[in-house]
Image (spheres, grey):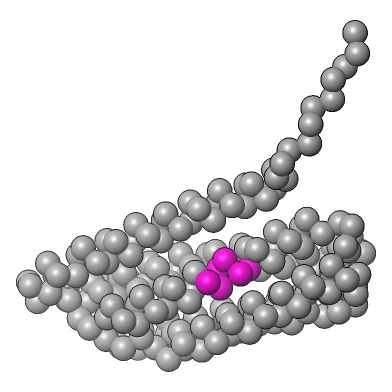
Amino acid sequence: MKKVKDPAPMIAPSRLNLWLFMLASCMLFAAFVSAYIVARPDAEAKQLWTSFDLPVYFFYSLIISVLSSASIQMAMQAAKKDELARNRVFIAVTLVLSLLFCYSQFLGWERMVMQDLTFVNIRPEHISASYVWVITVLHFLHILGGIILLVIAQVKSIRLEIHKKQITFMSITNTYWHFVGLLWFILYLFLYFAR
């Protein structure tokens, strides 16, 4: 009896896993944003809500995020054209920008601590700061996942394992990095206008 070979999947399992993870992440952030929206009116009615300006460093993070999305896209385009040296350069640029993003986030958190807006608050009216902490720290953890992907992509690029015929990992890294960038854009706008 002749063995029948299974057909190739329509979408690579790694890409499917990435999309499922991004969907789960969206649901997680939607839950925290919803909690913020629902808790605010009640807390304001009880005078347990403090409105405060977001640290400017979070806006700097937004600018860095946009720049890093551009650089990862350039890395992707270089890989598609077999411009391997340019691919390595733009992955490295994205890595540097990702570290600047992290530094900017730390400065923003430091500014919040200086204003006594911490995760665990002595004053109950600072519960609004706790929401900002949860949302920004969760996003930061997603950024760390992206940095791991960038480091692996850089190593693969150096080993000449990323090129137009072997582009799946670069595509996954590109998609995920754009996702965390877009996510920060949405979260920043929400936190800025919902304060």
Magenta stretch bounds: 177-182
Residue in the foreground of this view, choosing between 137 and 13: 13
Count of numbered circles in the view? 0
In the image: residue 77, left or right of residue 176: right
Main secondary structure of the magenta stretch: helix
Occupied quadrant, residue 100: bottom right
Occupied quadrant, residue 31: bottom left
In the image: residue 68, left or right of residue 135: right
* 13 vs 182: above or below: above
Q: Residue at image x 76%, y 78%?
A: 74
- Image quadrant containing the C terminus: bottom left
User: Is 117 within the magenta?
Assistant: no
Residue in the foreground of this view, choosing between 20 and 128: 20
Q: Residue at image x 79%, y 73%?
A: 77
Q: Residue at image x 43%, y 91%?
A: 56
How far across and down, in percent of the image, does residue 165 sit?
Answer: 89, 57
- Image quadrant containing the N terminus: top right
Which residue reaches farthest bottom?
56
How far across and down, in percent of the image, does residue 34 sit?
Answer: 29, 61
| Residue 118 visible | no
In the image: residue 177, left or right of residue 124: right
* 56 vs 174: above or below: below
Occupied quadrant, residue 173: bottom right
Which residue reaches farthest left?
46
Q: Residue at image x 78%, y 36%?
A: 8
In the image: residue 115, left or right of residue 73: left
User: Is 178 within the magenta?
Assistant: yes
How far across and down, in percent of the image, does residue 2 sit?
Answer: 91, 13
